[in-house]
Image (cartoon, rainbow, N blue to C red):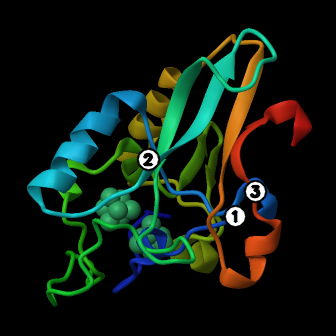
C-alpha cells in the first residue's frame, strides 16, 4: 500500500511521547548537530521562540556527562511538551492534505522527513501514526522517508563506550513528580 498522510491529520507535529519511559519526560523532534544552527536561524527568521535540548550523547569514560552530543531535540511549546513551535495552528492555512501546515516545511528536520518510518529493511512504521493505525505498514511512496532515515542513522553511528540519554523534565502536570531532568547513562536506564 502507498503511504500518504490521512486527510487533515497533523498528529505527529502535535503529540509528543514519553521515551524510553515516563521518567525521561516527553521527547522532542530529533535534531542532528549539523541541523541545529539552521533550525535556530529559521526560528529567528520566522520570529518563533524555540527550545532545543540535548537528546543523545556519548563518552569514552564513565564520567558526569557526555563529551560529545550526537543528537538534540526540538521541544513542543505546550506545558505538557506537545505541539511543535513551527506548526501553524493560527493562520487558517492548510497543508496539501488538509492538516495544519509546517512553517518550515521545505527546511524541516530530517526526522520530520523520515517519519513515520522507524526501520527501512524491513519496513517498519510507527504504529502511533494515524495512517499506520488504519493501514499498518506501507510499502510504496516511502523514498524520501527511507533516504532521511538512513542519513540519520549514518550520522548517529558511534563506537563510543558510553551512551547517554537526556531526561527532558517535561510532561503532563500529573507526571511531573516522577520525571527526571538531565543526563542519564544508558546502562542505568
Ligand atoms: S505522518 Fe501520520 S501522524 Fe503524521 S500527519 Fe501523516 S498520517 Fe498524520
Ligand atoms: S518542524 Fe514542521 S514537520 Fe517537523 S514537527 Fe515541526 S511542524 Fe511538524
> What is the distance, in whole Å, between disc 2 and disc 3 at their CAs?
24 Å
Earlier residue among tags 1 and 3: 1
Earlier residue among tags 2 and 3: 2
Helix, strand or loop under label 2:
helix
Q: Is residue 89 visible?
A: yes
**Residue 6: percent from the left, percent from the top?**
41, 79
Residue in the picture at 20% in, 75% down = 96
Q: Quadrant of residue 168?
A: bottom right
Residue in the picture at 43% in, 63% down = 2
> What is the distance, in whole Å, between disc 1 and disc 3 at their CAs?
12 Å
**Residue 31: percent from the left, percent from the top?**
42, 42
Neighbour tally class for label 3: few under 14, some 14-19, many 20 plus, Cα within 10 Å: some
- 28 or 133: nearer the viewer: 28
**Residue 88: percent from the left, percent from the top?**
23, 77
Mark 2 vs mark 1, foreground winner is 1
Q: Give the number of the disc on residue 18.
A: 1
Say if 120 sits above or below 46 in the image. above
Residue in the picture at 40% in, 81% down = 9
Helix, strand or loop under label 1:
loop
Earlier residue among tags 2 and 1: 1
Q: Give the number of the disc on residue 164.
A: none
Image side of residue 176 versus residue 132, left or right: right
> What is the distance, in whole Å, between disc 2 and disc 1 at their CAs?
17 Å
Label 2 near ligand 2 (CB < 8 Å): yes
Helix, strand or loop under label 3:
loop
- 15 or 183: nearer the viewer: 183
Residue position marked by numbered label 3 in the rendering: 180
Residue position marked by numbered label 2 in the rendering: 111
Residue in the picture at 81% in, 16% down = 62
Mark 1 vs mark 3, foreground winner is 3
Q: Is residue 106 visible?
A: no
Amino acid at each position: 500500500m502507498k503511504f500518504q498522510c490521512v486527510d487533515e491529520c497533523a498528529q505527529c507535529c502535535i503529540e509528543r511521547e514519553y521515551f524510553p519511559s515516563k521518567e525521561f519526560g516527553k521527547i522532542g523532534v530529533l535534531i542532528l548537530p549539523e541541523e541545529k544552527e539552521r533550525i535556530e536561524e529559521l526560528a529567528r527568521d520566522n520570529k518563533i521562540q524555540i527550545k532545543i535540548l540535548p537528546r543523545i550523547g556519548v563518552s569514552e569514560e564513565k564520567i558526569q556527562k557526555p563529551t560529545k552530543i550526537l543528537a538534540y531535540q526540538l521541544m513542543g511549546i505546550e506545558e505538557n511538551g506537545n505541539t511543535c513551535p513551527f506548526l501553524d495552528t493560527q493562520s487558517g492555512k492548510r497543508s496539501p492534505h488538509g492538516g495544519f501546515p509546517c512553517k518550515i516545511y521545505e527546511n524541516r528536520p530530517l526526522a520530520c522527513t523520515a517519519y513515520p518510518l522507524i526501520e527501512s529493511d524491513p519496513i517498519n512504521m510507527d504504529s502511533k501514526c494515524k495512517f499506520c493505525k488504519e493501514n499498518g505498514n506501507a510499502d510504496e511512496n516511502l523514498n524520501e522517508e527511507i533516504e532521511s532515515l538512513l542519513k540519520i542513522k549514518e550520522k548517529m553511528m558511534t563506537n563510543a563506550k558510553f551512551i547517554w540519554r537526556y531526561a527532558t523534565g517535561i510532561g503532563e502536570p500529573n507526571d511531573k513528580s516522577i520525571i527526571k531532568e538531565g543526563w542519564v547513562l544508558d546502562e542505568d536506564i
